[in-house]
Amino acid sequence: MDSLFEDIYYLKQVHCYFHLLKQKSSARNFLIKFKTFALILKLNKDAKISNYKERLKDSIKTGIAYTTGIINFDLLVLKSIEIDQVLFKINI
């Protein structure tokens, strides 16, 4: 009965929105959207890391490239937020 009312295009639509997702505001706001999509799409840890990095602003990607010791998704997120806040403070 549930499948009778299931939206068969839902996951396809989510994939399309995820494909268009880019960081446009703060890293914190972006993280909320990204985590929502990652949960719905059931991304594994490697996919989360690569997709998160790919969708960040270029200035934050550059900062991440100079950072060592990022061994998991949570550290990547913390570092991206830290870099974003520093760049905001110096107005880049």
Image (spheres, rainbow, N blue to C red):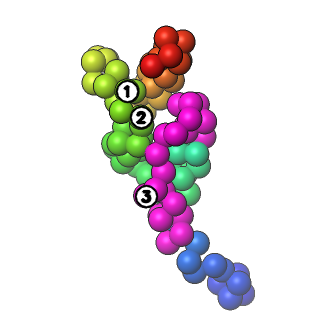
- The residue under the point 63% across, 79% down is 7
- For badge 2, the amino acid type reads Lys
Q: Secondary structure at mark 2?
A: loop
Q: Secondary structure at mark 1?
A: helix
Give the label on residue 57, or none. 2
- For badge 1, the amino acid type reads Ser
Label 1, label 2: how far apart the Cα atoms are: 6 Å
The total number of labels drawn is 3
Q: Nearer the viewer, residue 58 or 55?
A: 58
**Quadrant of the image for the N terminus?**
bottom right
Cβ atoms under marks 1 and 2 closer than 8 Å = yes
Q: 10 Å neighbourhood of mark 1: few (<14), some, or many (≥20)?
A: few
- The residue under the point 71% across, 84% down is 5
Farthest residue to the front: give it: 91
- For badge 3, the amino acid type reads His
Give how far across and how far down residue 20 sits, in percent: 46, 56
In the rendered view, tell whether residue 29 sits above or below residue 67: below
User: Horizontal placement of 86 versus 67: left or right?
Assistant: right
Mark 3 or mark 1: which is in front?
Answer: 1
Question: Who comes first in sequence, dot 3 or dot 1?
Answer: 3
Question: Who comes first in sequence, dot 3 or dot 2?
Answer: 3
- The residue under the point 45% across, 19% down is 92
Q: Is residue 76 visible?
A: yes
Q: Secondary structure at mark 3?
A: helix
- The residue under the point 56% across, 30% down is 26
Span highlighted in magenta in the image: 12-32
Q: 10 Å neighbourhood of mark 2: few (<14), some, or many (≥20)?
A: some
Identify the residue under disc 3.
Answer: 19
User: Horizontal placement of 63 versus 7: left or right?
Assistant: left
Label 3, label 1: how far apart the Cα atoms are: 20 Å
Residue 82 falls inside the magenta stretch? no
